[in-house]
Amino acid sequence: MVNEGIDRVFITETEVQETVARLGREISDYYRGQENLNLMVVGLLRGSFVFMADLIRHIELPLTVDFMTVSSYGDETVSSGNVKVVMDLDESVEGKDVLMVEDIIDTGNTFNKVLGLIAYRKPRSLKICSFLSKPSRRKVDVPIDFCGREIPDEFVCGYGLDFAQKYRNLPYVGILQRADQ
Ligand code: IMP
Ligand code: MG
């Protein structure tokens, strides 16, 4: 079923779950066997919370979780890269193996700034997992270590991704109806 306001399903619920399971396996394989592993999974709120909740259940290693909320200020439609920390992490990242989790990397401006902030706090290692990526929109390079799906330049929502704070609860990823439809 397609919800009101959604034009079409872009990534089905089954495909979403297959993608998340595959990422969990890749992440588990990468970290498994690392000596003194101290894995801390850090999600950027609010977009990543649905994805991250599913993802950590596919990571077969001891881990902790923490969250951070950032907002970009300046131009509202295109992220400017002027990032403000609205809610910081509870725990220190120093000496830990930090895996940053994001819903989607678009221009890369937001994530690039957040990475800089985290790197400055001296984690032992720093890796990035993004559910979606729009490579054609990139303004700054972001080295995504674990990427769910690359998508074209379409505005998508569902599975944590919002439009005006709505649609985060959809179990699939959809494309919005245009205003003239
Ligand atoms: P960036 O700084 O341009 O990479 O912005 C990334 C942020 O923009 C993501 O964390 C999302 O919150 C938002 N975003 C980018 N593209 C989409 C989309 O297609 N749907 C919903 N949110 C998006
Ligand atoms: Mg976001």
Image (tube, rainbow, N blue to C red):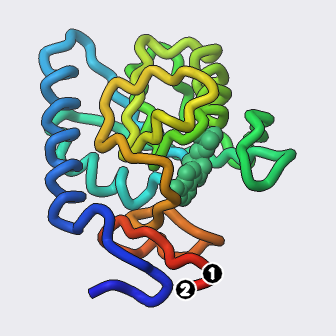
- Res 160 → quadrant: bottom left
Residue 117 visible in the shown view: yes
Q: Amino acid at mark 2?
A: Gln
Q: Are marks 1 and 2 in contact (CB under 8 Å)?
A: yes
Q: CA distance from mark 1 to mark 2?
A: 6 Å
Residue at the image point whose x is 50% and y is 35% from the top:
136
Q: Nearer the viewer, residue 93 or 16?
A: 16
Q: Amino acid at mark 1?
A: Ala
Q: Is residue 84 above or below residue 172?
A: above
Query: Mark 1 falls on what kind of element?
Result: loop
Q: Residues within 10 Å of mark 1 (few under 14, many from 20)?
A: few
Judging by the rendered image, the residue that carries numbered circle 2 is 181
Counting from the top left corner in percent of width and height, residue 29 is at 13, 25
Counting from the top left corner in percent of width and height, residue 162 is at 54, 66
Q: Residues within 10 Å of mark 2 (few under 14, many from 20)?
A: few
Residue at the image point whose x is 43% and y is 40% from the top:
133
Query: Mark 2 falls on what kind of element?
Result: loop
Judging by the rendered image, the residue that carries numbered circle 1 is 179
